[in-house]
């Protein structure tokens, strides 16, 4: 394959798996064996307790992602795999951002920014405030750009969770 002609883009893979111990390890280990980096992974139960849904975000060319999907389908605990089209998918991520608070003006600015981004302050101390922002990665990145000018002390992001639109 000619690497110069490869187009690396973000892919979102939704994997329905059996809800039992070791499944996450087997899926992550497949990526490790293929020397492929997972950008984000979120896992949680579905409407049926015997299944969990993994949302895996990765960067790569189409051929490599197709190979990974084929390899994923060979794992016994994998029930269904879907490559999600971002234009037809509801995407959300949660971020908790702890910011330095130097004075009352900064505290006021943080409250204003949180309101603009439809976030909320979930913790406040004398010298820090923690803001929760939920939305698309672009929305969270935009908030982080503004927050970095204030001073980010600590941050945690969940990674994407996603589901196709419609029926």
Image (cartoon, helix red, strand yellow):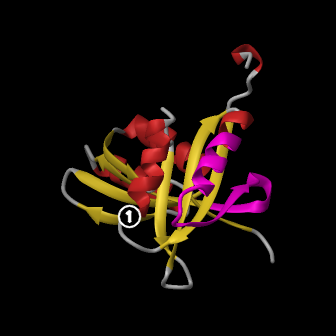
Relative to 22, is 4 above or below?
above
Give the residues drawn in magenta, as a range: 66-91
User: Residue at image x 73%, y 61%?
Assistant: 89
User: Residue at image x 59%, y 62%?
Assistant: 15
| Number of numbered discs | 1
User: Residue at image x 70%, y 59%?
Assistant: 82
Query: Is residue 86 within the magenta segment?
Result: yes
Query: Is residue 71 within the magenta segment?
Result: yes
Q: Nearer the viewer, residue 123 or 29?
A: 29
Q: Where is residue 47 in the image (x, y as percent from the top left)?
A: 56, 84
Q: Which residue is identified by label 1?
A: 121
Q: Position of residue 130 (x, y in %)?
A: 33, 57
Q: Does 110 sit left or right of 57 as displayed?
A: left
Q: Position of residue 134 (x, y in %)?
A: 52, 62
Quadrant location, the N terminus: top right
Relative to 23, is 99 above or below?
above
Quadrant location, the C terminus: bottom right
Q: Which of 75 and 10 is in front in this view?
A: 75
């Amino acid at each position: 394959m000619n690497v110069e002609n490869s187009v690396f883009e973000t892919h979102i893979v939704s994997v329905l798996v059996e809800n039992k111990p070791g499944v996450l390890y087997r899926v992550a280990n497949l990526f490790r064996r293929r020397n492929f980096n997972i950008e984000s992974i979120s896992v949680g139960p579905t409407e049926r307790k015997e299944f969990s849904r993994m949302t895996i975000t990765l960067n790569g060319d189409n051929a490599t992602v197709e190979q990974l999907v084929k390899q994923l389908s060979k794992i016994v605990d994998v029930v269904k795999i879907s490559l999600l089209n971002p234009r037809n998918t509801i995407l959300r991520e949660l971020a908790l951002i702890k910011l330095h608070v130097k004075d009352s003006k900064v505290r006021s600015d943080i409250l204003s920014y949180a309101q603009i981004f439809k976030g909320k302050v979930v913790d406040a101390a004398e010298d820090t405030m923690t803001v929760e922002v939920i939305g698309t990665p672009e929305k969270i990145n935009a908030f982080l750009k503004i927050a970095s000018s204030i001073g980010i002390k600590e941050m945690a992001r969940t990674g994407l969770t996603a589901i196709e639109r419609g029926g």
